[in-house]
Amino acid sequence: MIEKTPILNFFTHLILLGGLAVAFVPMWLVFVAATLTLTEINSPPISVIPGVHLLENLTEAWTRAGLGPKLLNSLAMAVAVAGGKVILSSITAFGIVFFRFPGRMVAFWMIFITLMLPLEVRIVPTYAVAANALWPFQAIIDVLGITNLYESLTGVRIAMEWNLLNSFTGLVLPLVATATGTFLYRQFFMTIPDELFEASRMDGAGPIRFFREILLPLSTTNMVALFTIMFLYAWNQYLWPLLITTDRANFGTAVMALRSLIPTTGDSTGGGTPDWNVAMAGCLIVITPPLIVVAAMQRFFIRGLIASDK
Amino acid sequence: MADISLRQVRKFYGKTQVTHDVSLDIPSGEFVVILGPSGCGKSTLLRMIAGLEDITSGEIAIGGRVVNDLEPRARGCAMVFQNYALYPHMTVAENIGYALKVAGVSKAERAARIAKVAATIGLADYLDRKPAQLSGGQRQRVAMGRAMIREPQVFLFDEPLSNLDAKLRVQMRIEIRKLHNRLGATSVFVTHDQIEAMTLADRLVVMNGGHVEQVGTPAEIYRTPASRFVASFIGSPPMNLMPGVVSGPNEISVGDMRVATRPHGLVQGREVTLGIRPEDIAQGGGACDMEVEFSEELGAARLYHGHIAGEDFILQIGAATGPVPARVRFDLPQEALHLFDRTTGLRLPG
């Protein structure tokens, strides 16, 4: 804003506070619920004053949902997805922006249209591929008749299989392969003046060197932003992990584990106890790591925005 | 040090031809300035020498070695870019030393050479700063230091002064020339600023529309421009050009005015362009007469603007005081006249 008057200030603050309330009240209710006992939470009206049972609820949620290993799984998965995403998208954007090769725009648009096909839309084919990651190649050689030819020549039938179900790779890879990051990096790389690339060529640096020593350091802010976004995205995944991991004990994630705390479906007896206090305590635990990541990364965001050495 | 030789260098962007059969020999150690209006292909020519652009046909040799297919790094050239193109995340020292780092020079030697270069360009106290913390002139110096450190055989400058303010530009111009005199490497400097070109060059290459119009020392080009384009492009204020017709063995008529020239040997009735520099006109009495429509005071000189034979005409006189006269009388001295063919624009003898 250019204008600064007391009245305007008052209203801007009012709007900000209103927004804060909308965002914060549900969080507060979750927190309050996590501090009450089962009886307190089930007696109306809704309490807005925290109780004193936070620790025992947290412990209960932790043990009942087995959150320890689940959090580790989630963390490993989110870091792998975010890291993989940063690597994959910086490399693909580098190829698309800095090299002139036939089919460059085709490649870009192929990547770009996957933006319109999020995992949820293509979940069935993705599952099919995850069940056998080599299936597309098998299909190609089947169609080309290579399989039959090879069988008639040698008597051996080619059958390729690489099953990703119930594996860490299967959990991570399909989430890594999306276009958002490539697009973000492309936009950033296009702001880099050509002369910088040319100067590095004159200095004798090849493309890989230019990428590593000039582009990557310049894109730190970008990298942090993408990492944070993708970390949250991966951490919050529910449908995909649910689908691909049947071995919940080994590969279950924290978000999936929350489900076992929800009263109605909680245990095998059906029904279950309506102990929302424990479920909310579980929520508190599960949202903490992403909060820490955002809080930690925010410092770099802001530093990147202030520094004018572009 | 190395000489540069261009043989019929052509460049096409798709179907557009950017340079037409450019041939040029630059002896070792010479400071050559390529001058021309924007879009004349001068920067492209420089970038082709650097190896940043491919050439469509022809041959470029540096130090007797054909470099058509060599990568920029193998050509022994260093380049100073218009926007400096400094690496924003590196300090001054890292910027200057990057080429050595890439070449795998040891850290100690690198530091020694960076210090030496930094002393030469007067940035020894700024080695730990980032480019963003430097002024325009200092960034320019870093860009030069980065070019110097490799001790290249050839320096290429792509309008390096155009982003500086007027005062700094003059200062850096002098520094560049001093540096050239000290290092003695062959330098090719591209600019659209004729003052820069005239003051820096050992030899000047004037380009227009992808063609080389004239090659020569600044004085030669000023005194005997090879074409109408060169005549109008070099010199400030620009040369007066008037349409004329040959009306005698040593006479040309311009409108209803008859101008005496040296014997030119042209046939009667041939259409020519007559040129004279505003500063070569003898003022105070004479055959010609012009209404002063507008005058410009430059302090050391005064310019009178008017029309002769329907064309804009500028007359420059020395420092003058007093009011601007309504009309001036002047003479066109024979020895200061330039004759050009009306259709081809090429210089005619006489």
Image (cartoon, coloured by chain):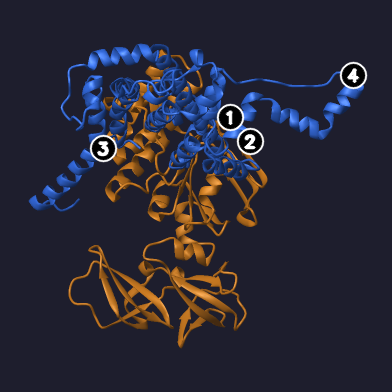
Chain colours: A blue, B orange
Q: Nearer the viewer, mark 4 or mark 3?
A: 3
Viewer can see residue B193? yes
Q: Are marks 2 and 1 in contact (CB under 8 Å)?
A: yes
Query: Residue at the location (28% across, 77% down)?
Result: B294
* Disc number for residue A23: 3
3 and 2 marks in contact (CB < 8 Å): no
* Quarter-of-image position of residue A108: top right
Q: Chain of mark 3?
A: A
Gap in Å between the C-alphas at discs 3 and 2? Answer: 65 Å
Instruction: Assign a secondary structure to mark 1.
Output: helix
In the depicted structure, whether residue A263 falls above or below residue B162: above
Residue corresponding to mark 1: B74
Q: Nearer the viewer, residue A164 or A58?
A: A58
Disc 4 target residue: A154
Could you give the CA–CA distance between mark 3 and mark 1, rounded to whole angstroms? 60 Å
Q: Position of residue A284 (x, y in %)?
A: 30, 23
Viewer-nearest of discs 3 and 2 = 3
Give the percent coordinates (x, y) of residue B211.
Answer: 58, 57
B175 and B330: which one is in front? B175
Q: Which mark is residue B67?
A: 2
Which badge, 4 or 3, is on the more N-terminal residue?
3
Q: Amino acid at mark 4?
A: Thr
Is label 4 or label 2 in front? 4
Task: Give the label on residue B124, or none.
Answer: none
Q: Amino acid at mark 1?
A: Ala
Q: Are marks 1 and 4 on the same chain?
A: no
Query: Could you tell me if residue B50 is visible in this image?
Result: no
Q: Is residue A298 left or right of residue B155?
A: left
- Disc 3 residue type? Ala
Q: Is residue A299 left or right of residue A189?
A: left
Residue A219 sits in quarter: top left
- Which amino acid type is shown beneath numbered disc 2? Val
